[in-house]
Amino acid sequence: MSSSPNVGVTTRAPISWRFVTAVGVLGFASGLPNVLVNDTLSAWLADIEVSVSSIGLLAFATLPYGLKLLWAPLLDRYAAPGFGFLGLRRSWIAMLSVLMFFAVGALAWMGPSNAASPMLPIAIIALMVAFLSATLDAAVDAHRTDAAAGVAEGAAASAYVMGYRVAFVSIGALILILVPIVAGNFGGRYDPHAREIAWRILVACGGGATLIGFAGALLAPEPPRRLAVQTLETALVEPVASFIRTFGERFLIIIVVALLFRLPDLLGNRMTMPFLRNEIGFEIQDIGWVRQGVGFAMTIVGALVGGYCVQRFGLIRSLLVFGVLQVASNAGYIVLGYVGKVTEVFIGVVVVESLCNGLVSAAFVAYFMELCEPRFAAAQYAILSGLMYLAAAIVGGVSGFLVAVMGFENFFILSIVVGIPPLVLLPWAMPRPRPLDSHL
């Protein structure tokens, strides 16, 4: 294994602005349903005082993000039914964006009325949204990885992360901020029935915004034709075989890093909303303004700086530094737990967390892209990102019980501890530099 600081970074051809813009739009399309089924739904449940245990259990509805590796190979072999005229990669993005529109509409219709509402129907709809969202992620990841082969992976990763985070901070923030305002038009800002109507309307509007993915599919250039995946058997078996041929025994280390590297952030996020709303006592609109609104600029800065650092200083240096910052940023919520409802401290915590999240997200997306062979982009990227989300869904599912047993402070300490092992293993999990013609 090379120890060069520029591991995984090669000289690339110039990248077009159309491609960068398209990647950003598709990042938004990926992030939007994710924020709706995670942060927004958690905020809705916290607002009506559903128990943290129940909120945590809904993390199991996000298991499709971890299991998408089972069906992602189909995206390398077949075009989406009825949308094949757009090409292999873009056809799936277009079709899934349309289906997502209806799925999120169902979530708005079936969402909870109060803390006594049955959770099973909500969990089923959330599972459906997560399945479509995870498959859309696989399609977008495949398009980006395939189209970016031979160009600047750092730039593509930054554009994707910016788009993804814009969805979180724009739609995510707007819904939280507008809940009391919309509720005021239906009987009162704090009237439970009025707030229920507001949640349903705003989530439905968020669902309407998922159609931007269809526009992104039209804007995005279809990746160049490569050696096609000829059979379904090849699509299912060869991606894993290619990983094993390329990395040998080191592939096991890569699996561990994929499982655990982003876990501090993903695990901490599961209980952040109940922590801020129910434990500390911030209002939903305040959380929207600060966590999503203030965090927006810092996330964009982090994504831009992260992509630049990958190109300038190399992948391994960037990942190590950003990984340490990601782990350390969760300590801010421990501090907030001590000082209580202090807006200035809350803002400071969010600024640090958002900056670190943008940095590490851009670097880790570039890392996954470097590991993948473009011909099997959907399957291989789904394997890597699926492992990451699988760990988050399983641990997130028990997060409410962990908080009930150990308290929020020890929970956030745990979220820091789990990030240490992958940092230690990272040098043995890096891709080797690869010649440009190996992409073809």
Image (tube, grey):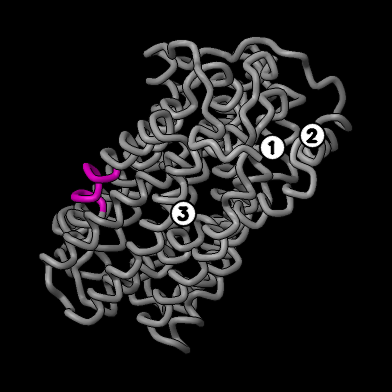
Residue 209 is situated, as x and y percent measured from the top left of the image, at 37, 35
Image quadrant holding the C terminus, namely top right
- Does residue 259 sit above or below 45 in this rendering? above
Assess disc 3: are there few (<14), some (14-19) or many (≥20) residues with their C-alpha within 10 Å of its C-alpha. many
Q: Is residue 303 magenta?
A: no
Residue at image mark 2: 242
From which residue to which does the magenta span run? Answer: 292-299
Q: Is residue 367 left or right of residue 224?
A: left
Looking at numbered disc 1 in the image, what kind of residue is underneath it?
Gln
Residue 423 is situated, as x and y percent measured from the top left of the image, at 52, 58
Residue at image mark 1: 380
Nearest to the observer: residue 29 or residue 410? 410
- Does residue 183 sit above or below 315 in this rendering? below
Q: Are marks 2 and 1 in contact (CB under 8 Å)?
A: yes
Looking at numbered disc 3 in the image, what kind of residue is underneath it?
Val
Image quadrant holding the N terminus, namely top right
Between marks 3 and 1 in the image, the one whose residue lies nearer the viewer = 1
Nearest to the observer: residue 35 or residue 95? 35
What's the magenta bit mostly, secondary-structure-wise? helix
**Under tag 2, what secondary structure?**
helix
The dot on residue 37 is 3
Dividing the picture into quadrants, the one containing residue 196 is bottom left
Residue lying at the far bottom in this picture: please name it. Answer: 405
Q: In the rendered structure, which disc, 2 or 3, sits on the residue that comes first in sequence?
A: 3
Q: Who's the residue at 43% across and 59% down the image? A: 265
Q: CA distance from mark 3 to mark 1?
A: 24 Å
